[in-house]
Image: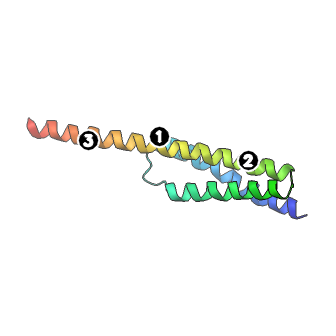
């Protein structure tokens, strides 16, 4: 029964990550994303996976951990992509302002 409840918890968390990734991709900005939060979630999933492996509880729950970790890793990639977009946008804005000021 505990494995079923743990899986339900992971599925509930797991449904939120793809939605978060889609929202972040569309936003094209890292301003509302938190790198420490993403890293904390990744650490938690790695700890859960490690616990399952150390106790030899290799079952469907472990698959849910790996799936969630994979989605959060995608979210991490989107964070760095969006941060790059933010940086390029700021550089363009500064250059654009300088050009306007020179005219």
Residue shown at 81%/53% (left/top)? 53
- Element under label 2? helix
Which residue corresponds to mark 1?
A: 81
In the image, residue 58 lies at what x, y percent? 86, 51
Which residue corresponds to mark 2?
A: 66
Residue shown at 62%/48% (left/top)? 72
Q: Residues within 10 Å of mark 1 (few under 14, many from 20)?
A: some
Left or right for 42, reference 32: right
Q: So how many labels did they put on this image?
A: 3
Tag 3–tag 2 contact (CB < 8 Å): no
In the picture, which quadrant includes the C terminus? top left
In the picture, which quadrant includes the N terminus? bottom right
Which badge, 3 or 1, is on the more N-terminal residue?
1
Report the mark closest to the observer, 3 or 2: 2
The residue closer to the viewer here, 100 or 87, is 87
In the image, residue 49 lies at what x, y percent? 75, 54
Q: Which mark is residue 93?
A: 3
Residue shown at 54%/42% (left/top)? 77
Left or right for 17, reference 94: right
**Is 92 drawn above or below residue 45 in the view shown?**
above
**Residue 43 falls in image quadrant:** bottom right
- Element under label 1? helix
- Mark 3 vs mark 2, CA separation in Å: 40 Å
Left or right for 42, reference 66: left
- Mark 2 vs mark 1, CA separation in Å: 23 Å
Tell me if residue 73 can be seen.
yes
Q: Residues within 10 Å of mark 2 (few under 14, many from 20)?
A: some
The residue closer to the viewer here, 52 or 97, is 52
């Amino acid at each position: 029964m505990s494995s079923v409840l743990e899986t339900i918890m992971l599925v509930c968390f797991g449904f939120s990550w793809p939605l978060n990734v889609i929202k972040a991709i569309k936003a094209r900005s890292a301003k509302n994303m938190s790198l420490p939060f993403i890293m904390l979630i990744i650490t938690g999933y790695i700890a859960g996976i490690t616990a399952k492996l150390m106790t030899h509880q290799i079952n469907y729950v472990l698959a849910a951990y790996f799936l969630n970790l994979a989605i959060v890793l995608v979210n991490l990639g989107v964070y760095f992509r969006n941060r790059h977009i933010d940086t390029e946008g700021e550089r363009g804005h500064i250059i654009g302002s300088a050009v306007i000021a020179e005219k």
